[in-house]
Image (tube, coloured by chain):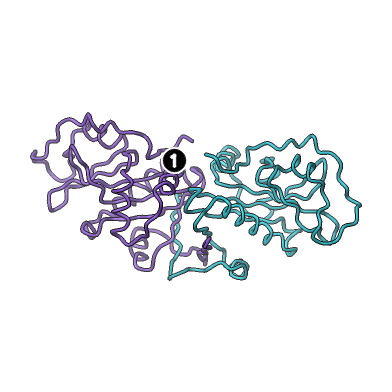
Chain colours: A cyan, B purple
Amino acid sequence: MDWPNFDIRAAANSAGIFKQNSKKSQGETNIPKDVLENLYGKDARECPRLNDGFIPVLSKSRPFDLIELEQLLQSVGWSQRPFQRVKRALSNSLLTVGLWKHDSRFPLLIGFARCTGDGVLEATIWDVAVSPIHQGSGLGKEIMKYILESLRDLGIERVTLFADPEVVDFYRSQGWTLEPKGHKCAFWYAN
Amino acid sequence: MDWPNFDIRAAANSAGIFKQNSKKSQGETNIPKDVLENLYGKDARECPRLNDGFIPVLSKSRPFDLIELEQLLQSVGWSQRPFQRVKRALSNSLLTVGLWKHDSRFPLLIGFARCTGDGVLEATIWDVAVSPIHQGSGLGKEIMKYILESLRDLGIERVTLFADPEVVDFYRSQGWTLEPKGHKCAFWYAN
């Protein structure tokens, strides 16, 4: 398979200098390109600096620490799963996206999402999560934009997801079509 | 990846003898095991003989002729797609299932379905199709049973699909949960 994968290792140790105090206007970047690429991979994207001063960075190649990922997912109320299963599920995903609170030495994982799919016709988005203390800052929207652009680059025809009732408006406001042509979602549980 | 794949080649040319005229009671099989495996792969399943005499066989490893597959999909009203894209989509699917009208030399494709997913936590079923002239014989149900058993063998936790309005009752009657906990399905189209 030739699609982006969380296993692509960013050379995180050769991070370089983080110009945290440089003043830049909105829309400009704060992290030097080489630092961004070394820490987060070549397709990483710096998001606008938030009010409390930190810079969020989106990456589809920086590897996850599974303990950190589990802590994030549990903080949004998801159930614990065996590490080995999670590892395999991530490795078999079409795309895994991390949202990081930038730090030149220890970036902190504050958001996540992943897709499964055939890499051509269909992709389905799962497990969109933003750490509760960072919710309401537009970060969920940044994750979704980044995913859709990545999937568009792959030439995917259609992207789907199953929306919890409380986030239906979130997706609707971003142009998603809910239940097109009367489609219903159907679930079947193994247990 | 170590999951079943349509590229696994069944040694179709070494088919052997097909005992079409042997009389057997319902529930017994008509196709000798070695013939079944050679033609359709080792996980193939013979379905009960239909009224018009033919035997349907399910397989997740017999390769598809893309022209035959396209003819089937167009017969149920789906749009034509470039072969190369279809080929890649099939190759990247978690599971592809063919339903064949058994013939010891030229099995005919009369049904199809496929899944995408991470092979561990999630699988999503797409493109369930039965040739119009064979609909209403319970073959769709056989395909779904075969898929769910295959996914259960992989240890998948949850299987999902998007049901067209006209097949909502079909899935409901087979134990699928529609829109659990108020979930809505959301679609985003590239074009």
Q: Nearer the viewer, residue A80 or A125?
A: A125
Q: Chain of mark 1?
A: B
Q: Nearer the viewer, residue A72 or A104?
A: A104
Q: Say what amino acid the circle numbered 1 marks.
A: Leu
**Residue at 70% from the left image edge and 42% from the top image edge:** A41
Q: Mark 1 falls on what kind of element?
A: helix
Q: Position of residue A145 (x, y in %)?
A: 65, 59
Q: Nearer the viewer, residue B94 or A41?
A: A41
Q: Is residue B56 above or below residue A162?
A: above
Say how many tags the image has.
1
Q: Quadrant of residue A141?
A: bottom right
Q: Position of residue A32 (x, y in %)?
A: 82, 46
> In the picture provided, is A81 more to the left or to the right than B163?
right
- Within-10-Å neighbours for mark 1: few <14, some 14–19, many 20+: some
Q: Nearer the viewer, residue B177 or A4?
A: A4
> In the picture provided, is A94 more to the left or to the right than B129?
right
> In the picture provided, is B16 more to the left or to the right than B168?
left
> In the picture provided, is A184 more to the left or to the right than A126?
left
Q: Position of residue B95 (x, y in %)?
A: 41, 44
Q: Position of residue B115 (x, y in %)?
A: 42, 49
Q: In the rendered image, which residue does mark 1 sit on?
A: B154
**Residue at 31% from the left image edge and 58% from the top image edge:** B74
